[in-house]
Image (cartoon, helix red, strand yellow):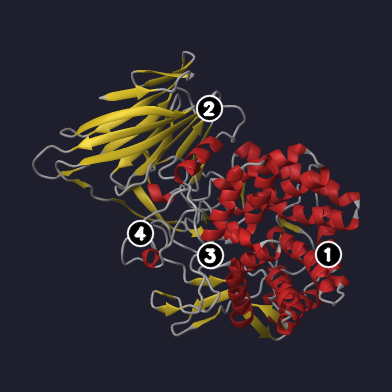
Amino acid sequence: MMKFKTMPGSKYEWNETKLHCGGEPIGTLLSEVQSGIQCLDEIKEIESGVFEWTRCITIPKGEPVRIEQLMMGFQTAYPTTYGMIPAVTYNGNEWGKGLEPKGFEKEGKAWVFAYHRTPIAGATYSEGTKWTVAFFGKQNEIGFSCSLLPEKASTAHHLIWPLQETPISYVGRDRYGDGYREQWIAEPELEYRLTAYLVIEPFTKSKAAWSKMLDTAWSLNFREQKAWHSPDKIWELGVQYVKDSLWAEDGLFRGFSIGLKWNGEMWAQRKTSRYKIGWTGQNISLANSLLYDYLINNDSSSLDKGIAALDTWAQYARLDNGLIRCHFDYLLSCAPDAREIQDACHLGAAAMNFFEAFELAERCGRAKPEYKEIAVGICDFAISCQSPEGKIGKAWSNRGISVDSEGTIGSSLIPPLIKAYKMTQENKYLEAAENGYTFYIQDLLKDGFTTAGALDTYCIDKESAIPLLKAGLALYEATNNAQYLQWAEHASWYLATWQWHQTVRYPEGSALHALAYDTFGGTSVSTQHHHIDPYALDYVLDWFKLGEITGDQTWIQRAKAAWVNGTIGVSDGTLEVSGKPRPAGSQDEGFFHTRWGMPFDVSEWLVAWPTAFRLETLRHTKDWSLWK
């Protein structure tokens, strides 16, 4: 039995299970209930185009019943031009070289994913030429799954009970295991309530209407949270970790290790790929935080280590063509030059942070014009290799020859171009930035995803969209052109598809249960790496700024939620995880929120970048109380 209720004056109408608007069909509800189970369904419009579907199930007197298959769904009345399961598949994941789930079916069967694999519980999204549809569930003690299956004339959105992943399960980077199905034993004379949400939005602009799904899910699930530590404590612990655990003196090198691994007896600095200028190593950002620590705490050891690290890279890593070597290990091992590449992700971070290092060093009483020269040199190199249409590229040899021109991540060099314009007032930098941004934002506008930012993969990901947000805001401030603000917000909506709108409950005995890990506000990495990390720390200030400019408080809520999530597991020096004591200020890179890697476990990789991004956020925040 199904009851329908629309809002007064609604433009939508139900004809039995078929949804219409102005007589035009949008789609049909789908339902599957095994025999012998009584259920009552009610669907009501809770705001324009948002329908809450509640199913109440009652088991008759007698023995418990094993629920084998129960489905709630919606089938569109039109073909799909774009389909997405957030953080899992973006139009079938056809871009890239990995073996992550491709397409919407495997061996003729729809991919079925657990609700906790995607940021909104069981969320699916599709768009046609006139309408977009999103469908997701409400989390409770009964687990469920989702599937999205586009066909020639329609697309089916399914929520499926009990929880299962079929026909196989994606269990690690490019690795698969057997499918699985959990049990649901329904007890007699109890009522079970299942809830799904159907979100309808007229198609206006391609790859943008998913914002209504995200807004709806956020408003349904948002709650205020408290960070693990105060901002002052985060600063103290971060500086301690940088100086006590990451500091390295190795031949020519003075700087920071990429992170700590457990060697069987203790946490020790990793022995391979150790010293990186940006991305996971963040040497220049960490050095800047030590200079800032000297300014606020007058700790001369922070100043000495910060300057030593910056001088090391400035003295030994610069190349004559404007590039800087991003991996110091090559300088220590005398590895052949041909093996090295310098990439846009590292170079963009290096340039931005060397510009800041120049300014911080002056404030510390240490004039270092070479820091600015390095940053400008990187920007000049970017201009020299930029194509007429704006493309910069992803990676180059030491001689400046392109070895990979693809990927949205080339946009990482746009923020420093804007900074170079602000510092020099030379129009060539602004022109290059505007040309580059117009080129790279088209990846997202056209494809509905961005690529090649997570450098240990080559796939659709989150990180490659971050410079589109940062550069869009910076160009808006530099030019007052509202188009850049609109594009920055578009990048933000894409980044929000990677942010967790739900709290997943983990089984007793798991590391995430012991840690009391809360997925809400966190972000996952890529379509190839299905784990949450705190990388949103890199753009919490940009989300905050976007909220202030647009007046949309949701961006500020998202920023604060990402900050809170990014403090979970930061050790105060007494924390133990899986029986191993953690050094003060350290934190895992990965939290395995689903059945990927070690299910419901942590990575045991105490990498440098989360500390760098927390400290960077604080040194760029005037009022630290924002992050309490």
Q: Residues within 10 Å of mark 4 (few under 14, many from 20)?
A: some
Please give the name of the residue rendered at 83% of the width and 48% of the height, measured from the top-left corner: 432
Q: Nearer the viewer, mark 4 or mark 2?
A: 4
Dot label at residue 337: none
Residue 128, which numbered label?
Answer: 2
Q: Secondary structure at mark 3?
A: loop
Residue 207 image offset from top left, x and y in percent: 59, 35
Locate residue 397: give its quadrant. Answer: bottom right
* Lower position in the chain sequence, tag 1 or tag 3: 1
**How far is mark 3 from mark 2, CA to CA?**
40 Å
Q: Residues within 10 Å of mark 2 (few under 14, many from 20)?
A: many
Q: Which mark is residue 506?
A: 4
Residue sitting at the far left: 62
Mark closest to the chain's N terminus, 4 or 3: 4
Mark sitting earlier along the chain (3/2): 2
**Res 407 seen here:** no
Where the C terminus falls, by quadrant? bottom right
Percent of width and height locating residue 517: 43, 62
- Name the residue tied to disc 3: 567
Q: Tag 1: residue type?
A: Gly
Q: Secondary structure at mark 2?
A: loop
Amino acid at pointer 3: Thr
**Sequence order check, earlier mark of 1 and 2:** 2
The numbered mark, 1 or 4, whose residue comes first in the sequence reads: 1
Does the residue at mark 1 contact the one at mark 2 (Cβ under 8 Å)?
A: no
The residue under the point 29% across, 47% down is 142
Q: Mark 1 — residue? A: 322
Can residue 360 be spotted in the picture?
yes
